[in-house]
Image (spheres, coloured by chain):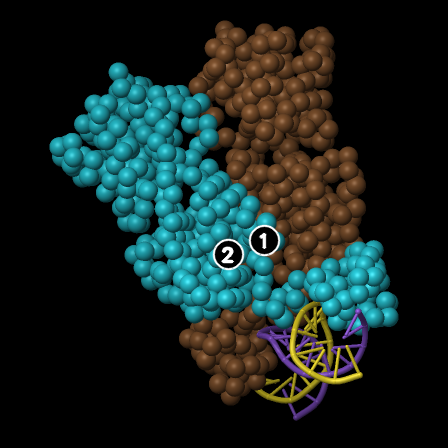
Chain colours: A brown, B cyan, C purple, D yellow
Amino acid sequence: MDNVNIKKLAKELNISTSTISRAFNGSHDINKDTKERILAFAKQHNFLPNHYASNLRDKKTKTLAVIIPEIANDFFSQAINGIEEVARKKGFYILLYRTDDVFEKEVSFVNYLNNGKVDGIIMSVSGEANDHNYLRQLESKNVPVVFFDRVYEDIDAAKVTTNDYESSFDATEHLLKTGCRRIAYLVVNKSISIGQVRMQGYMDALKKHNVPFDDELVIDCSNDEKVNYKILTKVLQEIKPDGIFSSVERLAFATYYVCNDLGIEIPKKLKIISFSSLGIAPLLSPALSTITQPAYEMGIKAANLLFEALEQKAAPSSNPKRHVILKSKLFIRKSSAGE
Amino acid sequence: MDNVNIKKLAKELNISTSTISRAFNGSHDINKDTKERILAFAKQHNFLPNHYASNLRDKKTKTLAVIIPEIANDFFSQAINGIEEVARKKGFYILLYRTDDVFEKEVSFVNYLNNGKVDGIIMSVSGEANDHNYLRQLESKNVPVVFFDRVYEDIDAAKVTTNDYESSFDATEHLLKTGCRRIAYLVVNKSISIGQVRMQGYMDALKKHNVPFDDELVIDCSNDEKVNYKILTKVLQEIKPDGIFSSVERLAFATYYVCNDLGIEIPKKLKIISFSSLGIAPLLSPALSTITQPAYEMGIKAANLLFEALEQKAAPSSNPKRHVILKSKLFIRKSSAGE
DNA sequence: TTGTAGGCGTTATCAA
DNA sequence: TTGATAACGCCTACAA
């Protein structure tokens, strides 16, 4: 009996398809013995109701999409862990998509999802001042979206972020207190909201301490490691900052490499602090000071918000579109130590 | 016009559903103008053929499952990148599942997939001397499986691994040449095949250099960081190895932490080398010597093998079940430097 | 080049 | 407690 389906099973068992269906769907309108007999026989024949057929009937996919800029990154991989955790408990599947920070990929993938492929979407975005209609179309199809970390302000969806402004302010202030006066701000994409918020914290801390803001010290980097290496080499040689506040982990690493090669001592000649979820930051040479976001918890929270929205959809009452802000932690280590 | 489907579209356009279907499936049996008119109208109404309905007809899901022990790990996240890369080009979706190295989760997830949910599976396994019938059932349903890195030898599927034996041999020999005589082998699960192969390389290198194998130096660790910390503290204090060969990145990090706390100097008092895909290994204090597997390439290769199998299924001719072995690279850094 | 119609495998409704 | 049946949305063989 190849390619078992509910009909063949029904024939074999001399029973109707509906009863079999009931056996699999936890219905109580079924005799216990019948149910057991069916499940045993089904197991023996390696049968499970076809997921796609069920979906077609129910319009529930039990699947959610996770769209993120990168996977090989401690922040995002920990966030995925959190999402996975929740999804698993709910019996949901996870569809993963990586945008490489390319806005067009994000758009094209979201558009693909616009056909009932998933029940909901969790994403960390890759664009900013763009046309976000592709997301509004999802709304119109009742596919809830939850943003985490990198969000679009103009889209009315649930959001999970961290207290980026405060953290940036504190980190910058910390560098100032250790004596830095020329603090470079490293960013990958100045224009995205998260880059802007973090920069605002940086600027306000400077202001508070009467250190003039210098445009030259805002270093716009790329996604290409080699390009970043060149940019940073030039910065360290020519602009000569005495402190680095990196809004992205990757750029802190690049700075370490450049310092190694140029023989610049950290923290003696240059102090560094960075947003980073790297677990082994204490093991770096020197140990890296970090602003560490609760990546795992953010994933958990984002998933929970999504499930709230999904359950709302079933029984709408309150507004599940909330903005949750979790706190990052500042870890001061050797890389930004004072004398 | 809410909940657009092919029928409503047909009515609106005064055209049959088949023609619309043709417009979306690259059929050539359709007038160019008609096609354009349909696609334009569909786009305007935000319509895309329902994925689940198409699948039900075609029995093709355009989806593949990736099952791995962990996500927040440089090796696996890079491998996912490779898989994603290939899948994207083929227009496939990726369903991600993490087992946490728990065999039961692997079994239960694979069983869930046994209902036409995916076209194929790529996995790195989490068990060993177990009953693998749950995988054989997939075979019987013609769902191809490709293993990478951690494989089940007894399952006849395509496999992608690295030259673990050689690498382990070389790494151990390297430690011996720098003067180590009491080299501890750190492993998470001795019994899984990859742990065994790596250990064999270790043992054979010892033998070649006439260093007796000491069972006490094989350290079986756990998945819990705290437990590992305790185990390793005890090992370093009581068994006092002069070299560490770690089969898993995580355990090398744990060793670093313990050495920091016990004040054991690396590499002076203890030399370390580890399997690891960590990009910033050179930035550790001291820089970590690594055996680095081509994680990304392994992902690419695994995905390619899977697609070969899928295409075979369509037109069976040769046997796509192959075993590809890629080479790891040894990077000798400060952590295992001689005097 | 286009249209008609049946069926993919499941489940909910209704009737028995 | 069980059974018959229609419908979910799409695609393809066949007819026109």
With B41 as the anchor, is B18 left or right in this view? left
With B177 as the anchor, is C5 left or right in this view? right
Q: Label 2, label 1: how many angstroms apart (C-alpha)?
A: 9 Å
* Residue drawn at 70 percent across, 42 percent down: A104
**Mark 2, secondary structure of its residue:** helix
Picture coordinates of residue A195, whole percent (x, y): 68, 27
**For residue A314, above or below residue B195:** below
* Residue drawn at 43 percent across, 69 percent down: B140
Residue B114, can we see it? no
Picture coordinates of residue A132, whole percent (x, y): 77, 43
* Residue drawn at 44 percent across, 19 percent down: A285
**Disc marking residue B90:** 1
Q: Chain of mark 1?
A: B
* Residue drawn at 40 percent across, 62 percent down: B319
Q: Residues within 10 Å of mark 1 (few under 14, many from 20)?
A: few
**Mark 1, secondary structure of its residue:** loop
**Disc marking residue B24:** none
Picture coordinates of residue B290, whole percent (x, y): 36, 31
The number of discs equals: 2
Quarter of the view holding residue A167: top right
Q: Are marks 2 and 1 in contact (CB under 8 Å)?
A: yes
The amino acid on which the numbered mark 1 sits, given as a three-letter code, is Lys
The amino acid on which the numbered mark 2 sits, given as a three-letter code, is Phe
Which residue position holds label 2?
B307
With B235 as the anchor, is A203 left or right in this view? right
**For residue A180, above or below residue B119:** above
Q: Earlier in the sequence, mark 2 or mark 1?
A: 1
